[in-house]
Image (cartoon, rainbow, N blue to C red):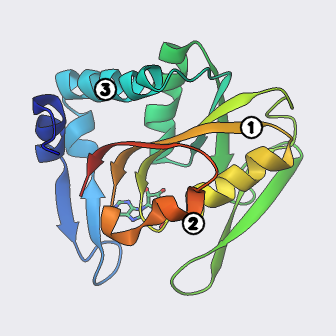
Amino acid sequence: MEPSPAVAQLSQSIRDVPDFPKPGIVFKDITTLLRDPRLLHLALDEMAGLVQSAALHVDRVVAIESRGFILGAALADRLGAGFVPIRKPGKLPWRTVAASYTLEYGTDSIEMHADGLDATDEVLIVDDLIATGGTAAAAGELVARLGARVAAYLFLIELTFLSGRDKLAESPVLSLIRF
Ligand code: AMP
């Protein structure tokens, strides 16, 4: 399906940076979108629109350090939801729960405050981009660990050729721009 004019415009504003942060990776740089007030507003409108079209109720947005925070906090406010950060190990000051996930070489882990969610919460997990889906799956595991429910995952960008959404089969996966 052809992307809408809005999505095409957002897509064109994203800068490809080859071989960053290491050889062979084409980094999708969203700073070129974020710096433009009109495009930032449009991206948030379109992302909030995906949530509204799916008729989802969201109590809290859980977002992943660090680019996920930029979109996640603004979306939480638009959706009338609270905001809960997920960070790299050792950054959060209170008691945490942690989940590990596999990278190309080795493993990484992420943490969330143990009192970040209530067991009754309907949660929207937000990040700027889904690649292999490992990070988002680990975020989903943290939400489940606190007894809350992942209402959906939402990404500005999906790298479809990596099939990351297959790792998130238990909840709807929404994405705005697909490469
Ligand atoms: P993954 O766990 O493989 O889905 O990777 C997702 C996380 O890594 C997100 O937090 C992204 O911001 C970041 N990431 C992975 N690949 C890229 C890429 N090509 N360009 C920008 N960010 C990326």
Please indicate whether residue 138 sits to the left or right of residue 9 in the image.
Answer: right
Disc 1 versus disc 2: nearer the observer = 1
Q: Is mark 1 within 8 Å of ligand 1?
A: no
Q: Which residue is mark 1?
A: 149
Nearer the observer: mark 1 or 3; the answer is: 1
Write down which quadrant ligand 1 falls in.
bottom left
Please name the residue shown 79% across and 47% down the image: 144
Say what secondary structure mark 1 lies in.
strand
Instruction: In the rendered structure, find residue 34 and report the number of the disc placed on it.
Output: none
Which residue is under mark 3? 46
The answer to the question of whether label 1 and label 3 lie on touching residues, with beta carbons closer than 8 A, is no
* Above/below status of 44 relative to 176: above
Q: Residue 82 location in percent, x, y?
A: 66, 21
Say which amino acid is labelled 1: Arg
Residue type at mark 3: give it. Answer: Glu
Compare marks 1 and 2 and give the one earlier in the sequence.
2
Q: Quadrant of residue 158?
A: bottom left
Q: Earlier in the sequence, mark 3 or mark 2?
A: 3
Along the viewing direction, whichever of 56 and 159 lies nearer the viewer:
56
Find numbered disc 3 in the image and state the secondary structure of the residue it sits on. Answer: helix
Q: Earlier in the sequence, mark 1 or mark 3?
A: 3
Question: Label for residue 134?
Answer: 2
Q: Kindly tell me whether residue 97 is visible in this rendering.
A: yes
